[in-house]
Amino acid sequence: MSPTGKNLVLFCCIVDCGKGSKVLKIAKKVGAVGGVVFLGKGTVRDELLKFLGILDVRREIFLSVIDEELEDALYNEMNKKLGLNKPKHGIAFSIPLKSLVKIDEREYKSKTEVKGVAKVSYEAIFVIVDKGSLDDVIDAAEAAGSTGGTVIHGRGLGNHEKARLFNIEIEPEKDIVLILSKVDKTEDIVNAIREKLNIDHPGTGIIFVLDVKRTVGLYEDN
């Protein structure tokens, strides 16, 4: 298997529950090989939602690996069909990848030439913790400046299979919290979660941070 020398990106799109299949269709139309949809929920604490009794805002998270050459077309279609460039219609972001294996039984190696990073001031923080620790993660992140995130529930696929994210096995009792953070707040958020949950203690959890090269749908409240 020889390297292709392509620039690869992990495309992530977070939309309301029920729209994941539409995102997949759009991605395939543009030329993506495929993708996977995870169920999740938002973490933003909205007092009006609580007053109305809406405590679980369900989300669907779509992940796909695409050639960077398809990125512009994919974002354009997402904006056109889903309105991601408008507030509260969902968000999407891209993460540069170094390599990828087992797509069409081939191995792809990216040139990792990232463009426009200076224009994007966000990073993706992934926190994997035991179920039951979610509130502590959210409390710590918000205290450090996070404006919200998305929870991806780990769920086994069968009796002898487990879901995997970035080659990490996710057991049914695990939660994954995805937080898009401004670069200047990432360290504070990570340290706050790390201290609150004592992440340095073995078996407590995992935190990792990835560069984000492009985003759409992120808006700051006035």
Image (cartoon, helix red, strand yellow):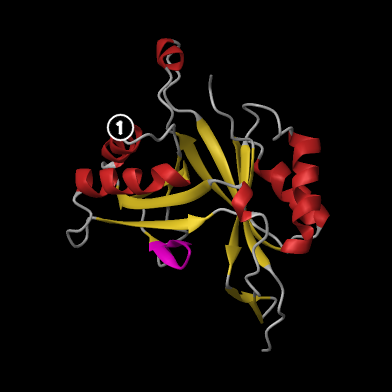
Any part of residue 122 in sight: yes
Q: Is residue 112 above or below residue 70?
A: below
Residue 11, given in percent of the width and then of the height, sits at: 64, 54
Residue located beneath label 1 in the image: 143
Residue 188 in the image, given as x and y percentages of width and height: 32, 44
Locate the N terminus by quadrant: bottom right
Whether residue 168 is in magenta: the answer is yes
For the point 37% across and 34% down, which residue is it? 145
Give the image location of residue 211, x and y in percent.
Answer: 52, 57
Q: Position of residue 37 (x, y in %)?
A: 59, 50
Magenta-span inclusion, residue 62: no
Q: Looking at the image, which residue is at 43% across and 19% down? A: 46
Q: Main secondary structure of the magenta part?
A: strand
Q: Residue at x 35, y 33 (%)?
A: 142
State which region is magenta.
162-169
Residue in view at x 22 percent, y 55 percent? 204
Q: Amino acid at mark 1?
A: Ala
Q: Is residue 172 left or right of residue 178?
A: left
In this rendering, the answer to whether 88 lies above or below 146 is above
Q: Is residue 12 visible?
A: no
Image height check: is 69 above or below 121?
below
